[in-house]
């Protein structure tokens, strides 16, 4: 993977990836917000795609991430709490498996920070609280494989 950032004007930069390009407008959205958005987009895409690979459908999907950062520089993430809220034709156990597969195996952005950030999650599936404030064990990753399937950020 290769990304090139080029200064455009003021606090605007162009990001060119192997697939596309986009403008980073720092006064509007900070790089750390882009980073958090990318992390959440990775796992959200997994929660949409993993069930599809098993013939299931997800709808009304949203994932919210709340971060606590250092007060002093570097202002890195200390904690990250992800709340998964969605409906599906799968069971609550399926919902747990999809979330764990994303967190532990397929979402490369979560797995990039999991050794340095305390991560927790909650799952609301079909209106029911399935997990609440569950801690993710740091280290490792790749422990929850759903077989030969597509996931957004696994590659």
Image (spheres, rainbow, N blue to C red):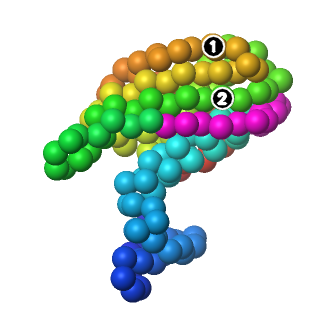
Residue 140, located in which quarter of the rendered image? top left
Which residue is drawn at the image coordinates 50% and 31% (left, top)? 82
Q: Could you tell me how many numbered marks the image carries?
A: 2
Residue 154 appears in the rendering: no
Q: Earlier in the sequence, mark 2 or mark 1?
A: 2
**Alpha carbons under labels 2 and 1: distance apart:** 10 Å
Query: Which residue corresponds to mark 2?
Result: 85
Residue 49, located in which quarter of the rendered image? top right
Position above or below: 49 against 97: below
Q: How crowded is mark 1: few (under 14 residues within 10 Å), some or many (20 or more)?
A: some
Residue 12, located in which quarter of the rendered image? bottom left
Query: Which residue corresponds to mark 1?
Result: 130
* Residue 146 on the magenta segment: no
Report helix, strand or loop for mark 1: strand
* Left or right: 54 in relation to 79: right
Q: Position of residue 22 (x, y in %)?
A: 53, 73
> Which residue is outermost to the left?
72
Depth check, front residue: 12 or 131:
12
Residue stretch rendered in magenta on the structure: 52-65
Report helix, strand or loop for mark 2: strand
* Residue 62 on the magenta segment: yes
- The N terminus - image quarter: bottom left
Q: Residues within 10 Å of mark 2 (few under 14, many from 20)?
A: many
Depth check, front residue: 120 or 96:
120
Which residue is drawn at the image coordinates 64% and 14% (left, top)? 129
Depth check, front residue: 145 or 125:
125
Q: Position of residue 43 (x, y in %)?
A: 56, 40
Which residue is drawn at the image coordinates 50% and 50% (left, top)? 37
Residue 129 appears in the rendering: yes
């Amino acid at each position: 993977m290769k990304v090139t950032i080029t200064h455009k004007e003021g606090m605007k930069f162009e990001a060119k990836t192997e697939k596309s390009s986009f403008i980073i407008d720092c006064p509007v959205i900070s790089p750390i917000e882009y980073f958090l958005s990318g992390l959440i987009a990775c796992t959200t895409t997994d929660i949409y795609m993993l069930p599809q690979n098993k013939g299931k459908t997800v709808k009304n999907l949203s994932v919210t991430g709340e971060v606590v950062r250092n007060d002093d520089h570097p202002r890195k993430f200390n904690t990250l709490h992800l709340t998964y809220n969605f409906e599906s034709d799968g069971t609550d156990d399926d919902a747990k498996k999809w979330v764990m597969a994303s967190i532990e195996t397929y979402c490369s952005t979560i797995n990039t920070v999991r050794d340095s950030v305390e991560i927790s999650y909650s799952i609301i599936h079909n209106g029911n609280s399935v997990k609440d404030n569950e801690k993710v064990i740091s280290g490792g990753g790749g422990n929850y494989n759903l077989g030969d399937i597509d996931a957004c950020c696994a590659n």
